[in-house]
Image (cartoon, coloured by chain):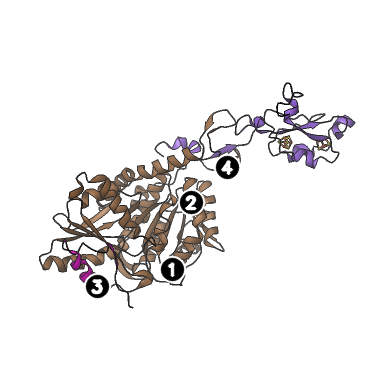
Chain colours: A brown, B purple
Amino acid sequence: MQVIESGNVAAALGVKLARARVIAAYPITPQTPLTEKLSEYIESGEMDAEYIPVESEHSALAVCIAAASTGARAFTATSANGLLYMHEQIHWAAGARLPLVMCVVNRGVGAPWTVWNDHQDSISQRDTGWIQLYANDHQQIIDTVLKAFLLAEEVMVPVMVCYDGYLLSHTYMPFDVPDSSLTDRFLPPYNPAYSLDPKRPANLNTVTLPDVRPDIRGDMAHGYMEIRYLLHKSMLDAIPALKKIDERFASVFGRGGAPFIEPYLCEDAEYVAVSLGSLSYHLRDVVDMLRGEGIKAGVMSVHLYRPFPAEIIAQALSSCRGVIIFEKALSYGYQGALTSDIKSALYRHTQDSSARPSIVNYILGLGGREIATHHLYEAFKSSCSPDGMKGEETRWIGLKF
Amino acid sequence: MKDKKNYCKDISFSEAGPGDAGKTGSWRIARPVLDPQICTPGKRNAPACYICWLYCPDGVITRGIPPKIDYEYCKGCGICAQECPTKAITMVDESSFLEGAEEDPCK
Ligand code: SF4
Ligand code: SF4
């Protein structure tokens, strides 16, 4: 069914169709309408789930961790400082291997306070062992939420579905809401490998020792390092798993085919812009403008940010001259995290170092600073030459000093 | 996690029982020694008290007459000695149980 709704409602519909059984969330702008919608669905009986109100984001994720440990499909959502407040439990959920799904409605983090969009919140959670997927529009939000549950349950790693605050969360767009008979076919009920059971009491995620240890039966149990290695391995397994899930999704709903990256006019492009989220669609307008002037430009969205599909990204970029990475977040004192990741992917996967594309990194839109198309155009165009790629690698757009 | 059957192995998972980390008795530097002449069940020849049993974090004290401590797993934390209301348990330095303890090489 085609509807015109907000991005937050697209996410809520996805969670409803996924038949999540436990929702625990604390309201924070711009995530609030998403959780309000879910509480409405539950209150009206449209959705058979428990909505557990909590006093903080830390508790929200703690509740989801407990719920998932008993075998329930659980969901939470947050933004910005709320996400940072969860940080300890974010690591915990990953190490505990619980297949949670969380929407991160991207917002800049304080100080100073901002409620507006950038990507610093989710990028700051990059190394927590969660899978991170970025959606570019409302259709991708609902579709990605559905895929996220299947992916999380397949590899037993929690998934963040990230989408831009306001730009997507509060804007209205037409999108298809799939029929529940199809979503039920795509996403079967969660069948946990283990769930807490009073008949077989157990302690989960107890203290480990630096070394392996025998358990009560004398069998060797993993130490911390083995458990963490297995998390890393499962993260890497998520790459082929997501490909399969995307194919399955396409076979049921007829949409898909770009699970990791989404290139636009990249095939013959000499200069390729790379970005996360809705900005990468904004950049398509700029690519069209540059193409109109005879510049071979393209743009690539990165959907799967962790695990980083390094080989796929390097292959997609290895034949262009310049890669121009537009980021709404940065690692202070260095550069945008995506830029570092792309550089390391190219270093590893391009054999001939002289053939490696040059890199420029633009930092823009922090705290919701408006990203004007002409700013993107000027920055992109000025980079589309060997000279344009020279000089300062990390450049800021839109500063008003 | 390709094979979900391994789930309980791929996280830190412990069940109740002695020896979740092997024969933890080797961790001990002081040994709780129970004097059945002072211990209430021992003295009265009847089940009673068992505060040590209740408090032992390793679950290695029996509710016997008198209670018995499993030294294969007792970590020597000393909680039983601390909690015993009759002071029937004394923590004794493990070195005194070593063979040839009298000839302490450190002396
Ligand atoms: S010393 Fe600690 S571990 Fe050993 S028996 Fe006493 S309470 Fe239990
Ligand atoms: S606590 Fe002391 S008195 Fe009580 S049973 Fe244990 S050893 Fe005996």
Residue A33, which numbered label? 1
Is A352 within the magenta? no
**What chain does mark 3 sit on?**
A
Labels 1 and 4: the sequence-earlier one: 1
Q: Nearer the viewer, mark 1 or mark 4?
A: 4
Q: Please report whichever mark, 3 or 2, sits nearer to the chain's N-terminal start.
A: 2
Vertical order, A73 against A54 (above or below) = above
Chain of the residue under the numbered disc 1 shown in the image: A
The crowding category of the residue bearing disc 2, from other C-alpha atoms within 10 Å (few below 14, some 14 to 19, many at least 20), is some
Measure the alpha-carbon separation of dots 4 and 3. Answer: 52 Å
Which residue lies under the disc numbered 2? Answer: A91
Q: Secondary structure at mark 3?
A: helix
Chain letter for mark 2: A
Q: Let me know if residue A393 is in the magenta part.
A: yes
Q: CA distance from mark 1 to mark 4?
A: 39 Å
Q: Which mark lies nearer to you, 2 or 1?
A: 2
Amino acid at the residue labelled 3: His
Location of mark 3 (residue)? A375
Relative to residue B35, is residue B11 depicted above or below?
A: below
Q: Earlier in the sequence, mark 4 or mark 3?
A: 4
Range covered by the magenta-colored residues: A373-401
Instruction: List the residue tagged with mark 4.
Output: A207
- Is label 2 in contact with label 1 (beta carbons under 8 Å)? no
- Type of the residue with mark 1: Pro
Disc 2 element: helix
